[in-house]
Amino acid sequence: MKQVDVYDPASCCTTGVCGPGVDESLAQFASLLESLRQHGVAVSRYNLSQQPGAFAQNDAIRAALERHGVACLPLVLVDGRVVSQGRYPSYAELDTQLKAVAAPVKTSACCTPAAGAKSCCG
C-alpha cells in the first residue's frame, strides 16, 4: 500500500474551515487527501502544535526543520521520500509522485541484449 505523510505547520486545524475565514488551499488539500484514502492510499497527517513528537522522530523532517526552520512546512512524503516542502502539492503533482513510487520497472524481451536488438524495438 502506498503511504502519504503530511507534516503541517502549527495550526488549530488541518481542514481550513476554522477561524474567521476559510483557507481554500487547506480545504482543497484536505479533500485531496480524503480522495486518496478512498482510493486505497494510506494517509497520515501531523500538526506541529499537536504532534511535535512525530516531527522529532522522522529523520528527514527533523533535518529539514534544522536546515530551514518551519518555512519548510508543510512537508509531504510519499513512501518516506520528500516530494514537496513549503507548500501543498496539487493533485497532479501528488498523483505523479504516487505513480512514480508504485510503477515497476518495465522491460521488454526485444530490448534485451539476448534478443539481439540494437534499439528498443524501434
Image (spheres, rainbow, N blue to C red):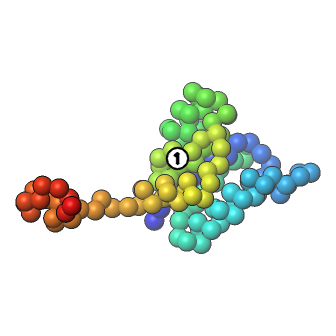
- Residue at 63% x, 46% y is 7
Estimate the x, y position of residue 28 in percent, counting from the top left: 72, 59
Q: Residue furthest right?
A: 20
Give the image location of residue 69, x and y in percent: 64, 30
Q: Quadrant of residue 42?
A: bottom right
Q: Is 6 situated left or right of 101 in this image?
A: right
Residue lying at 42% horizontally and 56% vertically, measured from the top left: 101
* Residues packed near mark 1 inside 10 Å, few (<14), some (14 to 19) or many (20 plus): some
Left or right: 48 as drawn, with respect to 5: right
Q: Nearer the viewer, residue 87 or 8?
A: 87
Where does residue 17 sit, x and y in percent of width and height? 83, 57
For disc 1, the marked residue is 83
Residue 52 visible? The answer is: no
In the displayed structure, 68 sits above or below 2; it is above
Q: Describe residue 16's horizontal placement relative to residue 45 as left or right.
A: right
The kind of secondary structure element at disc 1 is: strand
Name the amino acid type tagged 1: Val
Residue 31: image location, x then y, percent: 69, 64
Residue 64 versus residue 98 in the image, above or below: above
Please report the residue visible at 9 percent of the width from the left and 63 percent of the height from the top.
115
Q: Quadrant of the N terminus?
A: bottom left
Identify the residue at image location x=55%, y=54%: 93
Quarter of the image where one finds residue 73 = top right
